[in-house]
Image: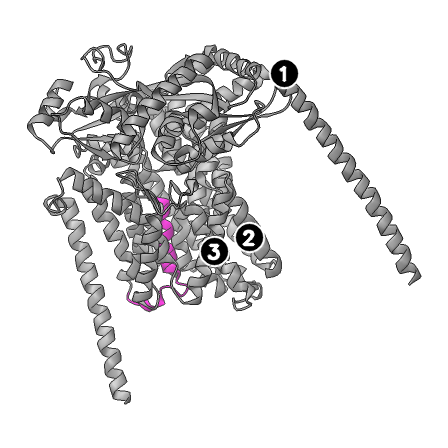
Amino acid sequence: MKTGGNKMIKNSKRFTVLFLALVLVILTACNNDASDESASSGGADYPKRPISLMIPYGPGGSADVQARLIGQSLQTQLGQTVNVISKPGGAGATGMNALKASKPDGYTIILTAVGPSTLTPNANNVGFNVVEDFYPIAQISEAPYGIAVNSDSGIESLDELLNFAKENPGKATFGTTGAGLHQHVVTTDFLNQLPDVDMEHVPFDGGAEAVSALLGNHITAAVNTISEIIPHAENNALKILAVTTDERLESLPDVPTFKELGYELIGQGAWFGFMAPKDTPKEIVDTLDGAIKNALDDDKVKEQFENAGLPIKYLNAAEFKEKVQVENEKNGKVIQSLN
Amino acid sequence: MSPEILAGLLFALAPAALLANLAGVALGIVFGALPGLTATMGLALLIPLTFGIPPIVAFSALLGVYVGAVYAGSITAILVGTPGTAAAAAALLEGPELTKKGEAKKALTMTTVASVIGGIFSCVVLILVSPQLAKFALTFGPPEYFALAIFGLSIVAGVSGKSLLKGVIAGLIGLIIATIGVDPVKGTERFTFGIVDLLNGINVVPALVGLFAISEVLTRMEGKGEQLRSKIGSTSIGLKASELKRNWFNILRSSVIGTFIGIIPATGSGVASFVAYNEAKRASKDKSKFGKGNVDGLAATESANSAVTGGALVPLLTLGIPGDVITAVMLGALMIQGLTPGPMLFTTNADVVYGIFMALIVANVFMLALGLGATKIFPKLLRIPEGILMPIIVVLCVLGSYSISNSMFDVMIMLIFGLLGYLMLKVELPLAPLLLAMILAPIAETNFRRSMLLSQESLSIFFTRPVSMVILTITFLVLGKIILNELNKYVLARKLEKESD
C-alpha cells in the first residue's frame, strides 16, 4: 500500500510537471500565433514561415508543373519554403473551398484556373463565388485554343467547316475536353452567334481523347489547346482552322484568328492564376504579385514554361481581378443557356 | 542501325541511367506495394527532380517507377488481401487463397516472373511495330470503346465465384455506384445530394482499398479468418519449373491481351488483367480450380498488367496521346525536357526514343532481380502476429486514402466501402464484379452516349463498324453460352432433386 501511495504521489508529480510543460508549450505556440497575426496584418515581415500553395487538381498535371516551377522561384526570392499541396475533386471546388476556409494571412494561396474559378461555381451549387470570396493575385499563363479538323476531311477554312455544318445538319460534330469545360463554353457561345449552323457537341475525357478521336476521323472538328494539336498539324495529320487569340500566333503565322474572321469570343484560352482568400492584406498580395512577376521574367522559368507548351501571360492583381469578374459573368450566362 | 539509335541504347546503359533506373524501380515497388500510394504520386514526386537531368537518365527513373509500381501492387494483394493499386485488383482472385494454402512464396515468384515476361514482351512489341499499332488504336472511336467495355462487363460471369446471380447483383451495385457524380455529357448532377466532393464521382482507389482491405480486417476481427501466422511454410514452397512450363502459352496470351489493351487509350491495366484471367479460365481444362488459389490465374493477371506498360507507351510516343493518368504525367515530363511526343519524335530524337526503349527493358531486368529478392523477404511479413499486422494495415489504408487527394472525404469513402465490403462478404456477394463494374461503367456509359451523338440517335452505329460489330458479336456469343450453362445447371439440379425424392 505504502509503495503504491508513493507511486501515486510520484505519478501525480510527474503529471504536474508534464501538465506545466504542456501549458508552456501551448502558451509559446499562442504567442507565436499572436505575433504572426500582428505581423500579417501589416505584412511588413511577410513571409516568416512556409507558404502552402494549393492546386485544385491532382499531382502531375499542368497546374502541378506550373505551381512547382513558380514555387521554386518564390522560395528563393522570399526565403521561405513553398509547399505545393494538391486538392483535387469536386470539379475544382474542393480546392477553392479549402482556400475560402483558410486564414487570409498570405500563408495559404492557390494556383487556380478558369474552370474551378469561373465555370464550376456557375454550373453547380458549390458554396463559393469567385468575385466575392477571393483576392486575385496574378495571372501567369494562358494557353490559347484552336479549332482543328482532320486533314483527310478536305476542309480548308473555318467558313468551309461552318458551311459543311449548315449543309449537313446534325452530321457535323465537335469534340472538346469535357461537358461544361472552358472549350465547350467558348465554342457554344461562338455557335450561338450562328443560329443556322448545327454542330453537335461530343464531350471527351480530357484533350488527349478528343485529339485521338479527331485523328481517327470519329468527329468532324475538335477545339483543343494549341500545344495539343500543333505536333499533329506539323505532321499534316490535322489542319488548324483558327486560333482564339487576338493576334496571330508566332508558331502558326498562317492560321487566322477568330477575331480577324469577324467573330468575337468570350474567352481566349485556358488561363492559370494565383488567388488568396478575400481579406488578405494588400501589402502581402503585392509582395506575392511582385515575386510572381520576377519569377516569370527569369530566363530559366521562361524556357521551362515554353517547353511545357504553357504560354506565359502575366496580368497583375488589378488586371487579373477585372478579367475574372468579366469572364465569370459571361461564362455564367452561357452555362445557364446550356442547362 | 543508325549511330543515333546505338547512342541512345548505350546511353540507357550508362552508370547514371542504370542507377536512376534501379532507384526508380525500388521506389516504384514501395509506392506500388503500399495501399493508396500510387505510381502517379511516385512520378509526380520525381518530376521536379528531373528538370535539369539529361532526358534518358530522367526517363530511366520515371519508367522504373512505372514498371515497379504496376508490378508491386500485387505483392500486398497476394500477402494480405490489400491491393496496392487498382491495376492489382485482379491479383485478389487467386493471390490471397494461395497465401492461405501456405504458398505465398510460390505466388510471389510467379508474379515476378510473369510480370517480367509480360513487361519485356510489350517492350518488344513497342520497339518493333509501334507506328502500325498506333494507327490501329486510332480506329477505336466511341462505338468501339463501348463494345469493349460491354465485353469487359461479360467477365462478371467469370469472376462471380459460386453463384452467377450473386455476381450479377454485385455488378449491378457497382454500376449504380458508378453513376454518382456529374453527368459526363450534360453536366447535370446525379446522386450527389449537394455534396461538393461527390461531383467527380467516387474515387476508385479509396473505394478499392476499403472494399478489399477493411472488409478483410473486419472479417478477421471476428476470428473466423484463417490465421496467416500458422503458415510459416510460406517461405519454403517455391515455384516449380513445371508450373512455369505449363503456363508458357497462358503467359504469352495474357501478354498479348495486356499489350493490346495498353495500346488503346483510356482502358487501363485493371481491365487487362481481368480479361486475361477470364481467358485463362476459359481455356483451362479444369475450371473448378480457379478462385481457390490457382497459380495459373496469377500468371495470367500479372503478365497482363505488366504488359500494359509497354503498350501504353505506344500511343504516347508515336501520337503524343496519353492513355491514362500515369502516361499523361510522363507526357508532361517529356515536354518539360523539350521533347514533343508524336510521329516526329522518331525522326528528330531517335536517340531519346531508343534510349527510352532500352530503359524500359532495363527496368524489367531490375524488377526481376529486386522482385526475386523480395519473394524471400515479403512472406516474412506474415510472421507478424495478426493483432499487430491488422492495425498496421488499417493505418496504411487511412494514410493512403488520405494522400491520394489530401482529402478526409476519401478516407470516409474508404471506410464506407470497407463496411459495404464486409456486409457483402456476410451475404456471400463477390467483391470483384462490383469493382469491375465501377471501372467499366463510365467507359461504357460515356461512349454509348458519344456514339448516340455521332449517329444522331441510331443504334446501327454499333453494327455498321467492323471492329465494334466483331467485339459485340463475340460478347453476345459468350453471354449466350453463359446463360445456356446456367440453364443446364438448373435443369441438372432439378433432375437430381427429383431422383432423390
Kindly indicate the quadrant of the structure image that contains residue B153: bottom left
Chain bearing mark 2? B
Q: What amino acid type should be assigned to the residue bearing mark 2? A: Val
Q: Is residue B291 magenta?
A: yes
**Residue B365 at x, y = what percent?**
43, 41
- Asked if residue A83 is positioned above or below residue B365 in the image, the reply reads above
Report x, y in % for residue A184: 26, 29
Residue with the mark numbered 2: B394
Spatial CA distance of label 2 from label 1 is: 45 Å
User: Residue furthest toward the right?
Assistant: A2
Q: Nearer the viewer, mark 1 or mark 3?
A: 1
Secondary structure at badge 3 equals: helix
Give residue A42's mark: 1
Please identify the residue farthest to the left as the structure is shown.
Answer: A167
Residue found at x 23% / y 38%: B137
Disc 2 is placed on an element classified as helix
Q: CA distance from mark 1 to mark 3?
A: 49 Å
